[in-house]
Image: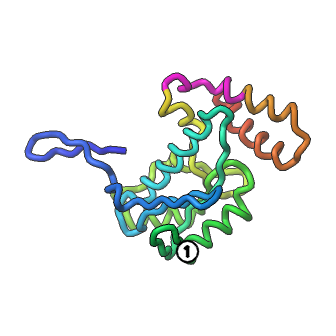
């Protein structure tokens, strides 16, 4: 993601946060993306990365559904090692509360960020409140954002969801796809 700044009358595109400030670790089927919380635009950038990653995974054939959590907390990272209370908090929220394909965050975390960085508040449409009062990164409406051929083709995604729902008896799988269906249907109408 870039923002345009003026430098001596000349416009330049610069990253919101330098790439070396964004950490990514992949461990088995887990992806940990982290940014220091004291950096302005950190929550916006992190949510954007999550939204982009989720929507790109929907574009795959077959789509890959992701779930996770955004939290604030201490984290230690060195090479392939990552641990700390922030990591554990995210893991537990994902494990206990994000049972459907979404990346959740608490209102408290959003509000704390907005209070600390009032000039860089997170846009209202970046997080939506869900059925269980958790907020989640809005990614379904961004489906196809990075792939113009897929842009707005919610009908194809809906068709895939329906095929899964019509062929599985596994309640866990059905719940995930029913949730996804509930997010896609308003975009079809």
* Closer to us: 96 or 170: 170
Quadrant housing residue 10: top left
Q: Residue at x 54, y 31 (%)?
A: 144
Report which residue position mark 1 lands on: 83
Task: Indicate the quadrant where residue 188 lies.
Answer: top right
Q: Which residue occupies the foreground of this view, 142 or 150?
A: 150
Q: Quadrant of the C terminus?
A: top right
Q: Viewer-proximal residue, 64 or 52? A: 64
Q: Is residue 167 left or right of residue 42?
A: right
**Residue shown at 50% from the left, 64% from the top:** 111
Query: In which image quadrant can residue 143 be found?
Result: top right
**159 on left or right of 136:** right
Badge 1: few (under 14), some or many (20 or more) residues near its Cα, within 10 Å?
few
- Residue 159: x, y in percent? 74, 26
Question: Which residue appears at 73% of the width and 29% of the height?
Answer: 160
Q: Is residue 185 left or right of residue 24?
A: right
Q: Residue at x 47, y 48 (%)?
A: 48
The correct choice, above or below, for 160 with respect to 70 in the image is: above
What x and y, as percent, mark residue 187? 64, 29
For residue 70, above or below residue 49 = below
The residue lying toward the viewer, choosing from 37 and 156, is 156
Is residue 175 shown to the viewer in this render? yes
The answer to whether residue 189 shows anywhere in this view is: no
Write the start and end of the magenta stretch as one range.
Answer: 148-158
């Amino acid at each position: 993601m870039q923002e345009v700044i003026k430098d001596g009358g000349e416009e330049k595109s610069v990253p919101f946060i330098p790439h070396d400030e964004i950490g990514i670790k992949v461990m088995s089927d887990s992806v940990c993306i982290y940014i220091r919380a004291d950096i302005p635009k950190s929550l916006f950038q992190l949510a954007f990365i999550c939204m982009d990653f989720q929507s790109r995974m929907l574009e795959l054939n077959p789509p890959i559904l992701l779930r996770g959590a955004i939290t604030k907390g201490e984290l230690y990272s060195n090479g392939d090692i990552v641990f700390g209370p922030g990591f554990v908090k995210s893991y537990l929220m994902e494990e206990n509360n994000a049972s459907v394909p979404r990346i959740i965050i608490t209102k408290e975390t959003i509000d704390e960020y907005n209070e600390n960085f009032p000039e860089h508040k997170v846009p209202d449409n970046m997080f939506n409140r869900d059925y269980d009062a958790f907020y989640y990164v809005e990614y379904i409406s961004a489906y196809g954002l990075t792939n113009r051929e897929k842009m707005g083709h919610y009908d194809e995604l809906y068709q895939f969801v329906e095929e899964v729902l019509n062929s599985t008896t596994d309640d866990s799988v059905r719940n995930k796809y029913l949730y996804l269906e509930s997010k896609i249907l308003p975009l079809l109408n």
